[in-house]
Image (cartoon, rainbow, N blue to C red):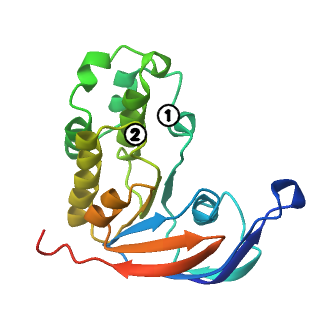
Amino acid sequence: MITLSQLTFSYTEAFDGFRLGPVDMAMQPGKTYGWRGNNGSGKSTLASILAGQRSAATGGIDGLPPRVLYFQQNIAANIFPDLTVGEHLRLCKTAERRADILHVFPSLSQFARKYPDALSGGQLQRLAFSLALIRDFDLYIFDEVTNHLDQQTAKLVGETMQSLLRRKPDCTVVFISHDHDFLRRYADVIFTFDEGKVIEESQYDHSFT
């Protein structure tokens, strides 16, 4: 279990002195979590701390696994611009993971020879998500992964991560999103952020859906 205890972080005055926390949170393996809230409420800041990109000012994190994927809102941070779409796919070494990728991006073969700068925003987002499936991680954090995606493709993203959790129940998935309907459909627990703090925790039972 990943446990955050009285975690805080503060930006400098140059960033309006934003303060995160204190945040208390527990996330169990095998579950999907949703983080929602307005822009600037602390979601991405907390994600960057869990990914090791920033250090908390105070508080502690227990049980943080060694392999953390942070899918950032900036698509360019999630792909290799000098590789073609086909070369991205060939980074995947298992047939099972290639099947996952083709489930989300069935038209991948049509773009195999293209470089990322020749793709549309939606195609780039699907390529970036596909790349996230190439290796195994213990904690997956997806920051606005459904941006630029139509409803059907967003559904495929949620279903793919549900399938991955069934095969690998020791990992944890976090979706950061403004799409509350998406979070309610796929998250077991939703944390609501406001002004740097978690103000609400909602449980969802998907056993009959």
Q: Which amino acid type is marked by label 2?
A: Leu
Q: On residue 79, which mark appears?
A: 1
**Residue 130 rendering spot, x and y as whole percentages:** 35, 39
Q: Residue at x 57, y 39 (%)?
A: 77
Residue 13 versus residue 157 in the image, above or below = below
Residue density around tag 2, few if under 14, some if 14–19, many if 20 or more, within 10 Å: many
Residue 159 versus residue 8 in the image, above or below = above
Left or right of 101 in this view: 52: right
Q: Are marks 1 and 2 in contact (CB under 8 Å)?
A: yes
Q: On residue 131, which mark appears?
A: 2
Q: Residue at x 26, y 33 (%)?
A: 105
Q: Residue at x 11, y 74 (%)?
A: 208
Q: Which amino acid type is marked by label 1?
A: Ile
**Residue 70 rendering spot, x and y as whole percentages:** 52, 53
Residue density around tag 1, few if under 14, some if 14–19, many if 20 or more, within 10 Å: many
Whether residue 2 is visible here, answered yes or no, is: no
Point out the tag, 1 or 2, that comes first from the N-terminus: 1
**Residue 90 rendering spot, x and y as whole percentages:** 34, 30
